[in-house]
Image (cartoon, rainbow, N blue to C red):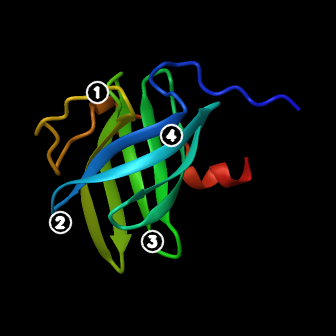
Amino acid sequence: MEPMETEADSRFPSGKWVGFFTDKRLAGKLPMELILTFRDGKMTGEGRDLVGDFTVLGRYATGDGVCSWNKTYFRAHTVSYAGFNEGKGIWGTWTLLDHGLTFTGGFHIWPEGYGIDTGDRLREEADLPDAVEVRELAPVGELEGG
């Protein structure tokens, strides 16, 4: 059996990704590490951050760079991510719904070794580009069956 090909688009290399998320409840940029696989519009992987170890299941589109995924912590909660890849990693916003409360923040991840200079440009209230707001990908939950 031959291994399946991963994504050819250079914006979505499979392998180690690094980055951070912001959260008003916690100070500063909170680092995260991920191992991601991009194949046929599906984004899968695992990672870890201050909260703990997690899995990643989502979708991406090479046409416009739109990405959405769920980050599910082991034996804990799930955080929804929506972002955009314009060639400098994926950035956007995350949302956590917890007991009737909604928490949000910003994030930026990129392939390890890209040398992204994030500076202080990402703020917690980061807005997604209009393209992300106009067109949504298929719900992440639909991936589990296919």
**Residue 56 in the figure: left or right of residue 1:** left
- First reached walking from the N terminus: tag 3 or tag 4: 3
Disc 4: which residue: 137
Q: Amino acid at mark 4?
A: Leu
Of helix, strand and loop, which one carries label 4?
A: loop
Residue 120 position, x and y percent, is 10, 39
* Image spot of residue 121 (x, y percent): 13, 36
Q: Nearer the viewer, mark 2 or mark 1?
A: 1
Quarter of the figure with residue 105: bottom left
Q: Residue at x 73, y 53 (%)?
A: 145
Residue at screen point 53% across, 76% down: 75
Q: Which residue is mark 3?
A: 77
**Image quarter of the N terminus:** top right
Badge 3 element: loop
Separation of marks 3 and 4 at Cα, in angstroms: 22 Å
Question: What residue is disc 1 on?
Answer: 115
Disc 2 crowd, CA 10 A, few/some/many (<14, 14-19, 20+): few
Of marks 1 and 3, which one's residue comes earlier in the chain?
3
Q: How many C-alpha atoms fall within 10 Å of the one at disc 3: few (<14), some, or many (≥20)? A: few
Q: Position of residue 123 (x, y in %)?
A: 14, 46
Mark 4 and mark 2 lie on one chain; the one further toward the N terminus is 2
Q: Is residue 21 left or right of residue 25?
A: right
Q: Position of residue 64 (x, y in %)?
A: 43, 23
Neighbor class of circle 1 (other Cα within 10 Å; few <14, some 14-19, many 20+) is few
Would you say residue 134 is visible in this rendering? no
Q: Is residue 17 left or right of residue 119?
A: right
The kind of residue tagged 2 is Leu
The amino acid type, in three-letter code, at marker 1 is: Gly
For marks 1 and 3, give the CA distance: 31 Å
User: Are the two marked residues, 4 and 2, in contact with CB atoms closer than 8 angstroms?
Assistant: no
**Circles 3 and 4: CB atoms closer than 8 Å:** no
Between disc 2 and disc 3, the foreground one is 2
